Amino acid sequence: MEVHLEPGHPSPCPIEPIGVIHTCFKEKFGIPRQPNLAAKAPGMLEFFPEFSRQEAVRGLEQFSHIWLIFLFHRAVKKEGGWSPMVRPPRLGGNKKIGVFASRSPFRPNPIGMSCVRLERVEITAKGPVLHLTGVDILDQTPVLDIKPYLPYSDRVDTARDGFAPAPGPGACEVSFSSTAATQILERQKTFPNLMSIITQVLENDPRPGYSSTHCSNMEKDFGPEKTEENRLYGIRLFDFDLKWQAAGNKIQVIRLDTA
Ligand code: SAM
C-alpha cells in the first residue's frame, strides 16, 4: 500500500535516536522480561549532543514514571525479515502467538516501550541526564523518545490481560552462598542495592523456556550428585559475571566472577 504524504512533508521516516541508555544489563540473558520486575535495576539516560538541551526536559521532573521508546538494537532479524509468529518465553518457549500479540523484540520494526521510574533529572555540564530504575533494557540501547506516564489515561484498571495475567509462573526462591553474600556486600559499596537487584532478577527466573511449575514438586536440593542442578548459569551484570545454580524453583547465587 502506498502512503500519500502531504506536499512538503519531511522524509517518510525522520527518526533518529535522541540518546542512549546505560544499564546494569550487559547481555540479553537475565534481563527482566518487562519493566519494574526488577524495581531497583538502574539505568542512566544520556542525550546525544543535538538533543542534550536542558529546556527539552523542563517539567519532566514532575513525573514519577516515564515511557521510554527505544530500538531493540541487538534483536537480529532472521534471513528474509520478520516472522509473523513468535514463541514468548512466558508460554514456556514452545507455544506460538502472533508477533503483534507479543512484546517480543523480534518484530518488523524493532521498537520497544517501557514505563520506568524516573528517580531524578540531573543537569550536568554536558546536559541533562535521567536517572531511572526498573529497566528491562540492554546496556547501550539507543533511545528514540521519552514521554511522561499519565496515570489518568495510561492506567486501565479494567484491562484484559490475555495470556499474560502475571509476570510468570511463580517467583523463584533466591538464596546466597556465603562467598556470594560476602562479595555482594563488598560490591554494594560501588553498586547500591546490589543484593536487591540480584534477588529481583533471579526471582523472575531467567532460565529460557522454563516454567518453574514443571519442577515445583521435584523438591530437589542443591547437591553434587545432581546434573541439571549442577549447571552453572552466568549473567553479566554491572562489571561482573553472576554465577548461579537452580533446582526446581530454588535458585542459589554461587559467586561473582570478574567479567
Ligand atoms: N518492555 C519492552 C516492550 O514491551 O517493548 C521490552 C520487552 S522485551 C520482552 C524485554 C526483553 O528484550 C529483555 O528481556 C531483553 O532480553 C530484550 N532486550 C532488551 N533490550 C534489548 C536490545 N537493545 N536489543 C535486543 N533485545 C533487547
Image (cartoon, grey):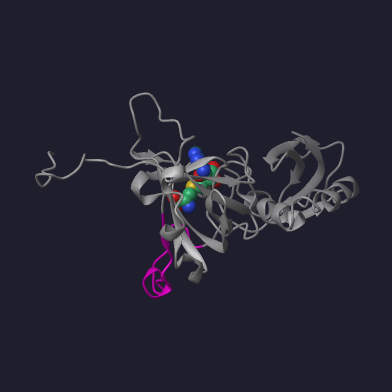
Up the image or down, 153 lies above or below 219; here it is below
Q: Position of residue 47 (x, y in %)?
A: 48, 47
Expressed as whole percent of the image width and height from the top left, the position of residue 143 reads 45, 46
Which residue is at a point 74% across and 45% down the rendered structure image? Answer: 246
232 within the magenta span: no
Q: Is the magenta stretch mostly helix, strand or loop?
A: loop
Q: Front-most of 71 and 63?
A: 63
Q: Is residue 166 visible?
A: yes
Front-lying residue, 67 or 17: 17
Quick check: 15 left or right of 63? left
Question: Quick check: is 149 in the magenta stretch?
Answer: yes
Which of the image's four quarters has the N terminus? top left
**In the depicted structure, whether residue 130 falls above or below residue 158:** above
Range of magenta residues: 146-165
Image x and y of residue 80, in percent = 33, 25
Instruction: Give the residue at x 10% y 47%.
Output: 6
